[in-house]
Amino acid sequence: MTQRCVLGIETSCDDTAAAVVRGGREVLSSVVASQTELHRRWGGVVPEAACRAHLASILPVVEEALERAGGLALGDLAAIAVTTRPGLVGALLVGVATARALAQSLGLPLVGVHHLEAHVVACQLASPALEPPFVCMVVSGGHTEIYRYGGLGRMEVLGRTRDDAAGEAFDKAAAMLGLPYPGGPSIAKAAERGDPKAVRFPRALLQPRASLEMSFSGLKTALLYRLKGVGSRREGFGPAADLAPQEVADLAASYQEAIVDVLVEKLRRAARHTGLRDVAVGGGVACNVRLRERLAAMAEQEGLRLHLAPPAWCTDNAAMVAALGWRNLEAGLEVGYEQAVCASGVGSRCA
């Protein structure tokens, strides 16, 4: 049975992760070394610092993943899978170089994995009955996209953000409101005490005939103007320190509701557009409790089958990488020691 085990390695951004998955479905271990505390001082991910942290963490994380998987040795594995795109190029190189060295030294196949497709597969890990084709939204700090997923490597983009990703919009709002990084969890926590109807923030591209594209930059600007006032000469972000706690909570709740409204409505329209009844949502923002509540209500109203990745598999992890790696290995896709890295996502060409 160990010959069906794949070691996954994920270093696309600021989490160093390794996991062992058997047969593409059974997660034997999943280990993540977070860099949140490291980057909190800057209020966002600093690529150079992230790369250095990956270098320090990668081998201990791999060793821990093997130990948690029942004390497996590297020689017991069927293959090693690693994220090759999209992401921070330097961070990706740390993972790919490590995976290549291990695979070549042991004569194991090396399988390249697309990070966004891995988020789709995370939904299948949580819902074994979920089979293509289905609609999937991946919503995170760097990506907000809706796909028609037709199986391995077949990701048709139905709509995506034209500017900020939803997670990025949360991070920027948290900075304006004086809330700690990462912004998504901070906004969600503050919003628990707030009124989502206190401020009517804009919802872009929700006209009846609008496409499945999204935009969050106008929402971010609306919050900035709310805090500073149009034409203000104050430097930096708004005067969040002058706000009462309830004002911060109301702004957070209203801002969160605006993002959730757009995401839920776009997924609803995508399901109607494709006629597919299975819809899935993954990525770090899919941890948001309000979003999950609203998605469940929408799915019930529309008669859809909703598949949500559990929170541990929404944020960056290597279980989804190993699972997709096994499937790619079986199909003969993305296998070889010369795995190129690429910052771009679906539809991009990488050397």
Image (tube, rainbow, N blue to C red):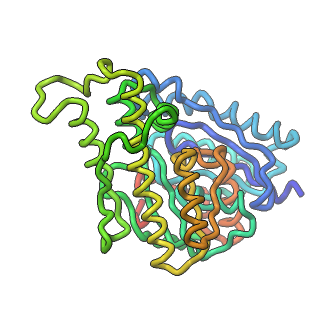
Q: Nearer the viewer, residue 160 or 232?
A: 232
Horizontal and vertical percent position of residue 27: 78, 51
Horizontal and vertical percent position of residue 248: 38, 28
Residue 249 higher or lower than 207, as above or below? above
Name the residue at 12% across, 29% down. 232
Residue 37 in view, yes or no: yes
Q: How many marks?
A: 0
Q: Nearer the viewer, residue 282 or 78?
A: 282
Specify the quadrant of the image occupied by residue 90.
Answer: top left
For the view shown, which residue lies furthest in the top direction?
241
Name the residue at 61% across, 42% down. 98
Residue 168 in view, yes or no: no
On the rendered structure, is 130 left or right of 72? left
Residue 277 higher or lower than 111, as above or below? below
Horizontal and vertical percent position of residue 191: 47, 36
Name the residue at 72% across, 49% down. 7
Q: Quadrant of the N terminus?
A: bottom right
Name the residue at 73% across, 56% down. 79
Q: Nearer the viewer, residue 340 or 315?
A: 315
Residue 295 higher or lower than 9, as above or below? below
Horizontal and vertical percent position of residue 262: 40, 57
Q: Nearer the viewer, residue 103 or 50?
A: 50
Specify the quadrant of the image occupied by residue 88.
Answer: top left
Q: Quadrant of the C terminus?
A: bottom left
